Amino acid sequence: MDPSSLFFSPEALLGGVLWLTVTFVCLLMLGLTWWRPSYAGWRGWACGNAGVVLGMLIGALRTPDTRLTSVLLGNGLVLLGSALLLLAFTRFAGGRPTRRALWGHGLGLFGALLALGALTVLSDQPTARFALVSVFLLVNKGALLHLVLREIRRTPALAGAYRLNLGLLLLTALLTLPRTWALLSGQAPADSFMPTLPNLLTALAFLTMAVGGAFAFWALHEDRRREEVRALHGELERLAHRDPLTGLLNRRGFRQAQEQWEARGGPEAAILLVFDIDGFKTMNDRLGHALGDDCLRALAACLDDVAREGDVAGRMGGDEFLLLLTGPAAQIEAQVSGLTSRLYPGWGTPLGFSASFGAARFRRGDSLDGAVRQADEAMYARKAAGLPRRSPQPSPAAPVAPALIRSAAS
C-alpha cells in the first residue's frame, strides 16, 4: 500500500477528526481559564491537561518519518503536563510549594527531558526510554494519588469530584496500556494509523482525558465554589440572627426562635427573663469599653450555660438580655436559682459583677414586646426594693427563684 494513500483513508479522516476535537477542547479550556481566572492552580491545570493530551496524541502518530519528533515532542509534553497537573492540584488544594520544592521539581523535569533526548537522539534505546517516562509518570501519579486521597478525607464536600478526577486518570492509564504494550513488542510503525483495538482504545483515552478531564476538573471547581457559597450563606445567616459580640441570638433571631417554639407544641406557657448589668454605663465610662465588652460576653456565656434544650437566649442590645425558659416548672426553678447564685452580690458572684433580672409568664400567642415590658418592670421593681440583696444569709436554697416564678405567674 502506498503510504500517501493513508492521508485519504477513512482511518486518516478519523484521526483528523480526533486531532481537531482534542485540540479544540484543549484550546477552549486554556482560553476559559486565562480569560476567567479563578482558584490557584486553575490555569496550571489547563496547561497540564493540554500538555498530557497533546503529548499522548503526538506520541501515538509514530511513523518512520515522524518517529524522532513524535518521541521527543510527545513524551516531552507528557512529562511536562504531568508535572504541571501535580502542581495545579497541589495549589488548588491550598498547598503552597516552597521555593526549594519548586526547584527540585524543575530540576527533576529538566533531567528527565535531557535523558529523554539522549535516549532518543544519541542512541535509540526504546526500553530505557520507556522505563524513564514510566518512572517519572509513576512518581507524579503516586504523589497525585496521595494528594487526592488526603483531600477526600479532609474535604468531604469535594470528595465526589476528587474521586471523579482520580477515576478519570486511572481510566486513561488503563486505556493506553494495550497501545504501550504493542509498541514495546515491536509493532510495525505502519500500524499506527490502522483501526486496531489498541489504537482505538488509545484514541478513546485521548477523548477521555481531553473532554472528560475538562468536565471532571470543572466539577471539582464548581463543587468548591458551591461549598464556599453555602458557607458564605451560613455566615450571613449567622450574622443576620446572631449578636457578633456575644454569639447569642440578636433581636431578629430571638423572635424567630420564639416563633419556632410556639410552632413546636409542648408546654403552653414559659417564663421570660429580662437581664441588665448593674451600673453598666458607669463601668463603661470609668473602666473602658473593653472591660464592658468582657462583662457582656461573660453574662452571655452564663445565660448560654444555664439554657437547656428548647430554651432561647438572646441579646436585645446594650446590656439588655433575654432568656426564655421553656421546660417544666421544677427545671425552671433550678435554672433561676442557678442564675441568682451567679449574678447577685453576696452569692459568690463568680462573674465579678452583678446583674438584675425580672420575670414574666409568656404564653403562646402573647406579644413578646408586652412580656418584655412586664419582665422589665418586675426587674426595676426588684432593683428598687433591693432584692435579693436584703437576704441576710444567702444560699442556693433561698426563696428567690420561687418568688420570681410566682410573681411572673401572677
Image: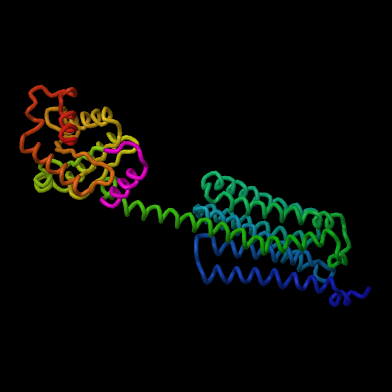
Q: Is residue 271 left or right of residue 389?
A: right
Residue 379, compared with residue 239, is above or below; it is above
Residue 106, visible in the rendered structure: yes
Q: Residue at x 64, y 57 (%)?
A: 82
Q: Is residue 308 left or right of residue 43?
A: left
Name the colouring of the figure: rainbow
Q: Residue at x 60, y 68 (%)?
A: 29
Q: Is residue 8 magenta?
A: no
Question: Where does residue 260 sit, x and y in percent of width and height?
Answer: 34, 46
Residue 392, compared with residue 161, is above or below; it is above
Residue 61 position by quadrant: bottom right
In the depicted view, which residue is nearer to us: 186 or 12?
12
In the depicted view, which residue is nearer to us: 243 or 312?
312
Residue 64, compared with residue 399, is above or below; it is below
Q: Which quadrant would the C terminus be assigned to in this image?
A: top left
Q: Which quadrant would the N terminus be assigned to in this image?
A: bottom right
Q: Residue furthest right?
A: 1
Q: Residue at x 50, y 61 (%)?
A: 39
Question: Where does residue 243 sit, x and y in percent of width and height?
Answer: 27, 49
Q: Is residue 365 left or right of residue 196?
A: left
Q: Residue at x 6, y 34 (%)?
A: 386
**Residues shaded magenta:** 251-269
Q: Is residue 268 magenta?
A: yes
In the depicted view, which residue is nearer to us: 147 or 403?
403
Residue 129, visible in the rendered structure: no
Q: Is residue 256 left or right of residue 41?
A: left
In the depicted view, which residue is nearer to us: 407 or 16?
407
Residue 357 position by quadrant: top left
Question: Where does residue 47 sit, x and y in percent of width and height?
Answer: 60, 65
